[in-house]
Every structure is written in structure tokens, then in C-alpha cells.
Image (cartoon, rainbow, N blue to C red):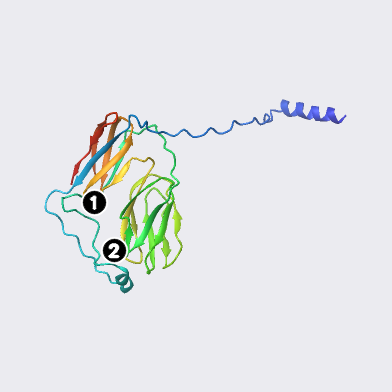
Amino acid sequence: MRWFAAAAGVLLAACSGGPPPAEKKDAAKPASYFQADPATAGKIAGKAVFAGKKPVRKKIVVEDGDCGKTMQGELLAEDLVVGASGGLANVFVHVVAGLEGKTFAPVETKVVFDQRGCSFRPHALPVRVGQPVEVTNSDQVTHNVHPMPKENREWNQGQPPGAPPVERQFSKAETGIRVKCNVHAWMRSYIHVLDHPYFAVTGEDGAFEISNLPPGEYTIEAWHEKLPKQTAKLTVAPSGTAAGDFTF
């Protein structure tokens, strides 16, 4: 009689419109990430220059005595750094159009964001979405790292001397995240978060290179913290080099 009761229960559930038995779901398919063909990949190379009279970098007055002890030489502002040949430093150049429909593998390699000489190092930090950022303090002075994003979560991490590194991540692409130190007002930098690997930051010579690009048409943007951003449209030929110069 038990088998009859069980069968009747199943029949009753089916007649009453109950939910059907759960179906087995297929195993999740592995993500398909884009990789450029090295046989045809090209690059964008160029230079960001500052036209006109070379600006004099402002000397920062350091009122914290402990900072004065840990610094090597005078501290100069980094908001407008122009090299001897007119190259503009700390310009973040990245592809903003031409990669539609492509998904790129995540990056697990850590990038280091250090507090050294009472400055943030580097001044302009590019990082991929989800990439680990190791925040360190190399000074014998208490600092804190306070990014102020618009698209990502804001955080504020204090670090006294000798504190262990702290690991953070950014979950969304966002350009120009200002970072400040609440302890030392002159300390500031910018973090740029990208969901693709095609970007570069200029040094004092103003030069940059974005390599391993598949052939195609692209729009690139040059972002600077103090000067208006610029864009340029260009074509990368198979195994070719496209010029992308900017004058500020």
C-alpha cells in the first residue's frame, strides 16, 4: 500500500499544477576572453607635449617635521610636470572606442601603491578592474590613502609606520579617481581603472606606447589632472604603428 500512496501523491501534485521536478543545469561554460593575434597585432605610439613657456613646479612647504626627516631633498608639486624637451608627464592615455564586444581576462598580478617620501608613488596609477592593489607605507610617518571615486566604493585606509600592506580592488572602470591623504594635505594622486589592457602613462619625456592591439579603428583619450582631456581617432594597420600625438 505504501507504493500506492506514493504514486497517488505524485499524481495529485501533477494534477494540482505544482512545480515540475527540478532539471539539472548544465555546468557553467568557461568565459571566452579575447586575445590579439601576435602575427597581426600593432601598436599606438606617440607623445604628449606642453606648448608654450615651461611652467615652474611649485615647491611644497612641508609643515610636518617627521615628513621633513623622511624626505630626500625638496618636495615639488606633481600636478604639472614638463620635461626638458617639453614632454608632459602623468598623462593617462587609453583606448575609449574600438574594443566593443571584447572581454579580457582578469589580472591577478598585484600593483603596488606606495607612500614614500611623503608622496604617493606612482602619481598616476593605472589598474585593471578587480586587480589587487597593494597599499604600502615606506615612511616612518603615519599616512592614509583615501580614494574618492564616483563609480566605485570610497574607502579610507590609515597606515602607521611599519604597518603591513593592505590589499584593495576596484570593481568598475573609472578614470581619474582622486586620492588624498587626510594627514598631509599636499599628498594627492590619481588612480585609473580600466576593463581592458590598452593604456599607458607618460613619463617626463611625454612618450607613450600601447602595444598588442588588433588591427582596427580606435579612439584614444589623453587625460591630465589639470588640463582639458583630448581625444584622437586613428587606424592601426596589421603589424603597424599608428601615431597618436597630443599637444596641451
Neighbour class for label 1 at 10 Å: few (<14), some, many (≥20)?
A: many
Tell me if residue 22 comes above or below residue 191 in the rendering.
Answer: above
Q: Earlier in the sequence, mark 1 or mark 2?
A: 1
Outermost residue to the right: 1
Q: Nearer the viewer, residue 42 or 6?
A: 42
Q: Residue at x 31, y 38 (%)?
A: 211
- The residue carrying mark 2 is 186
Q: Residue 156 is drawn in which quadrant?
A: bottom left
What is the total number of numbered labels drawn onto the structure image?
Answer: 2
Instruction: Give how far apart the Cα atoms at labels 1 and 2 are.
Output: 19 Å
- The residue carrying mark 1 is 89
Q: Residue at x 21, y 45 (%)?
A: 48
Q: Residue at x 14, y 54 (%)?
A: 54
Tell me if residue 64 comes above or below residue 92 in the rendering.
Answer: below
Q: Residue 238 is drawn in which quadrant?
A: top left
Q: Nearer the viewer, residue 124 or 215?
A: 215
Residue 163 rendering spot, x and y as whole percentages? 45, 65
Q: Amino acid at mark 1?
A: Ala
Residue 243 rendering spot, x and y as whole percentages? 22, 37
Which quadrant would the N terminus be assigned to in this image? Answer: top right
Residue 69 rendering spot, x and y as whole percentages? 31, 72
